[in-house]
Amino acid sequence: MKTKNLLLVVLFLLIGTFSLPAFSFAQGNWTQKADFPGMGRWGAVCFSIGTKAYIGIGDTTYEMHSGFKDFWEWDQSTNVWTKKADYPGNSGGMAVGFSIGTKGYVGTGSKYGSGGFTNDFWEYNSETNIWTQKATLPGAVARDGAAGFSIGTKGYIGTGNLDLNGGGENYCKDFWEWDQATNVWTQKADFGGGPRMVAVGFSIGTKGYIGIGEDVIGGNDVAEKDFWEWDQSTNVWTKKADYPGNSGGFAVGFSIGTKGYIGMGVDYSTMKAFNDFWEWDQSTNAWTKKADYAGNSGGVALGFSIGNKGYIGIESDGTTFHHDFWEYDPSGTSGVAEMAKENIFVYPNPATDILTLNFDNRNNADLTLNIYNVTGELISSETLRQNQQQINIGELSNGIYMVEIKSNGWSEKQKLIIQR
């Protein structure tokens, strides 16, 4: 039954400078870490082992004419980078990286120092700092831009751009399993979506995930949005909820617990870069927008997780290269300021149809009232020019919202519940 209209009264004392605590709808918090010490690059590879991350190879251009061989270790506990043994394989970039136990693996990619691609596959021993070549990925031809992940003692590589007739756009959807114990590759069921390259891949438990990426249809670059789950026990692909973010390709992806994360990337046809960041819940098959990536919007970046934290950095658009490196804490706040409790009064809350705001605008500043839903989408905006103003919220559905008062140089946010 609908109750009578309730009033939400918010008192804003806009006098002097605020020093306020943080508030968020668990959008996550970004914290900058030590910059990557190597040269800026495009198409590098990464994996994590324990509390360490490993980043290397790549090139200064998408075409991978020269390529880098250096490899670096980052220590989560000390925030220190250390140079490790150079990568000895053929790939100069656009390779696949993942880890199994104390070993890291790098395979496929654009060939180092020349045109074409490679299918070679190498193991890195983090305890001895030694690279060892393993069985080459089978299949008709080499590839770059593939996706990969690991589950238990098995590694997986699939999709990508095949090296046919001197290169070109020859996207594929085959999918391969590598057994660490036997050093044998076995072909598994083809990826459930269409052929593509520069997709993202990660695993959660005994399930692997590959999605988005770029395809060519009718001679035009097409950004794919589909997202698929592969079951290791059944070798079956199942389509999941489409990715709602901007990018179709060159995005980053990793998992933390039972959640997957995808963000960044570019529009392959225009090379427009994005910095939006999304969380996928394995239990609900639902996407939730998180705090945008706080670093440079280079589009093409690296991403991985260590424990309950995610990491993104070393962005590039192919011409501009960045060295910054950021940590994402999904349980943290978004860094948006909240009104101090002594300066804000909310009653009654929940509200129904009318939102009333009382504030003392002594500087007569132009103020804006924004209302966001739980995914961070702006759904209402009003200009506030008087010391008291009523806002009609009757068209908003029941749920939790964020009310923001914004002016030049600052913004304040407050949780709002609408319940009828």
Image (tube, helix red, strand yellow):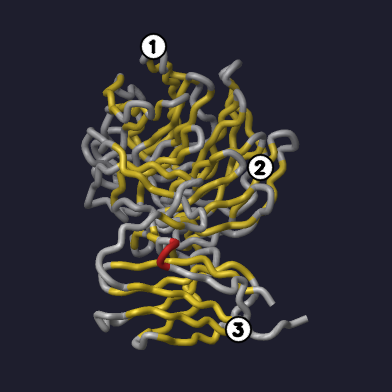
Q: Counting residues from the N terminus, which is met first, the one under dot 3 or under dot 2?
A: 2
Distance Cα–Cα, label 3 vs label 2? 46 Å
Q: In which quarter of the image is residue 351?
A: bottom right
Residue type indicated by callout 3: Asp
Q: Which of 391 and 319 is in front in this view?
A: 391
Name the spot of residue 321 as percent of width and height, x first. Answer: 23, 47
How packed is label 2: few (under 14 Cα within 10 Å), some, or many (20 or more)?
Answer: many
Q: Counting residues from the N terminus, which is met first, the one under dot 2 or under dot 1?
A: 1
CB atoms at circles 3 and 1 under 8 Å apart? no
Rendered image: mark on residue 230: 2
* Camera sees residue 88: yes
* Camera sees residue 143: no
Discs 3/1, front? 3
Extreme residue in the right direction: 1
Left or right for 293, reference 81: right
Q: Which of 269 and 395 is in front in this view?
A: 395
At numbered mark 2, what does the secondary structure look like: helix, strand or loop?
strand
Q: In this view, does 145 lie above or below 86?
A: below
Left or right for 269, reference 101: left
Left or right for 61, reference 269: left
CB atoms at circles 3 and 2 under 8 Å apart? no
Residue to which mark 1 is pinned: 128
How packed is label 1: few (under 14 Cα within 10 Å), some, or many (20 or more)?
Answer: few
Left or right for 390, reference 315: right
Q: In which quarter of the image is residue 374?
A: bottom right
Residue type indicated by callout 2: Trp
Q: Counting residues from the N terminus, which is met first, the one under dot 3 or under dot 1?
A: 1
Distance Cα–Cα, label 3 vs label 1? 66 Å
Residue type indicated by callout 1: Thr
Name the spot of residue 164 as percent of width and height, x first. Answer: 44, 44
